[in-house]
Image (cartoon, rainbow, N blue to C red):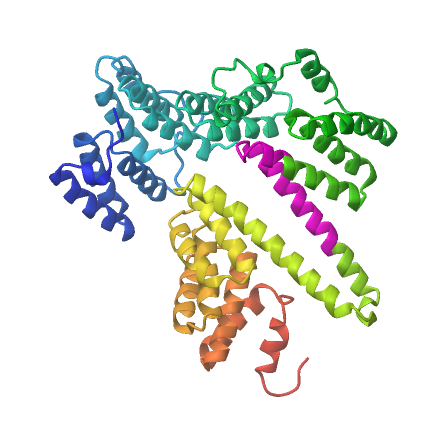
Amino acid sequence: MATCSEKELPEKARALWIKARSAADLKNYGYAISLLQNILKEAPTFLDGRKMLRSAAIAQNSGKKGSGLFSSLSSVSLRSAGNVKKDPLAAMDQAERMLDSDPFNLGANTLLKEAAMAAGMPETAIFALETLVKGSPKDTKVLHELGELYLASDKTELALEIFNRIAEINPSDLMALKRAKDTAAHQTLKQGGWETAKSYRDLIKDKDEATALEQKGRSFKDVATIDAQLAELSQQYEANPQHLDVVRQIAQLMELKFEQTAASEDLAGSVQWYAYCDQLMGGSDPALARKHSDLRLKQLDQSIREFEDWFANGGGEHPDAAQYAQQLADMKMEREAANIGEARKRVDRNPTDLQLRFELAERLIAAGQYTDAIPELQRARQNPNVRLKAVSLLGRCYSEKGMKDLAVQQYKTAVAEMVSMDNTKKDTLYRLALLHEAMGNHGEYTACIKDLYEADYGYQDVAKRVEASYSGPKA
């Protein structure tokens, strides 16, 4: 069954959907869940509704102890599991009722996935596994299953990302490494219009040459050996500058050489070759693009450190100091832009992941882009895991934009909901105090500062501020 959009909902369900969204916005999660359950009974393929249902259940059950990821199917779900093929929609409904009180339940999500597959709803099956991954990001068994389902649904970019994530969690997982390699090769074949090729080997006429190139991918122990290999590969490159495997090998060897020498010129060479490799691939390999991006950021960080060290050691007296200062500022701006760009790409791939929106907002704030950060934080505060930090940062954005009354409101909300006096609460309370001081609210300013003083005498300049507020000699 094809996924149902909001516009395709029956009239009655569409009216309930409007009410459900309003209830969720008002944090009336119980009412929203009830409405969404009724909508899904009438329109089981309405995936957006199912996603909102899960978000509401997660918010409602935040802090509660559920049976969790490691639970098995309950007796109720086992009875439903027996009817998956006979009546998959009924099994899905049963799974959803279990997930209302325990949204990350392994058994219920597994039941939902199997019932959805039986009903011909792979997008819903994928969503069930994505929920499990969100609850347990390092469960490689579930990750493998999600990766395979992505592949079956022709979501090769997402599949490659999953298999690479598994390899990061467990570098000895040979299956994940193989699947990542096969997926990247498949993606390249598809992008290049070579779907008839059985593997990337078929793209190379000389298969003996392909084998030799693979063997050259092993680790080398010394720089001399790397240089010798680079000299050999450079001849092949001169003969055919479009040879993807040769270019990739040169990029990898330059990266390996940098790891041995830590020389800036070797890092620069690696960045240039990976950029060319990415160009030859047409940007179709996310892992390759990420490698180029990571190395470029590493190059920027190295250059920034060198400039800062130079200035710290008296470089400011140099006749061209102003020019170098501008170069340093430009590199810092490029680094911030690259960080923001990567965060935006992750949000674009997973627009409903509020954690990713929060991370994007953090990077926007670091770059001073407060206006762009506000809508991301407004969305992110719906995630109970980052809600308080998001509210606090929202207050900071409003403050930076001169909206002091709105900033005070956000800071007060965050402070009121924070239980322990951790660093986040201290920072929020301190910013609230400074805001009250700037607005002339002396009573509120003093109350905030004293709360900090009682919790942490040494925090910032709190002790000085509190003691200065008393007249008479100080101890």
Residue furthest out toward the right: 224
Q: Nearer the viewer, residue 264 or 202?
A: 202
x%, y% of residue 373?
46, 58
Q: Where is residue 250 in the image (x, y as percent from the top left)?
A: 73, 30
In the picture as drawn, the residue positioned furthest to the left comes out as: 12
Residue 448 versus residue 394 in the image, above or below: below
Q: Is residue 336 above or below residue 81?
A: below
Left or right of 12 in this view: 220: right
**Viewed as shown, does residue 22 lie left or right of 367?**
left
Q: Does the magenta stretch include residue 4?
A: no
Q: What residue is shown at x 45% (from left), y 80% (from top)?
A: 441
Query: Residue 461's image quarter?
Result: bottom right
Tell me, yes or no, if residue 68 can be seen here.
no
Q: What stretch is highlighted in magenta?
A: 277-304
Q: How many marks?
A: 0
Q: Depth check: 164 or 300 in front?
A: 300
Q: Nearer the viewer, residue 23 or 291?
A: 291
Residue at 42 percent of width and 59 percent of height? 374
Residue 153: image location, x then y, percent: 39, 23
Q: In which quarter of the image is the C terminus?
A: bottom right
Q: Is residue 96 visible?
A: yes
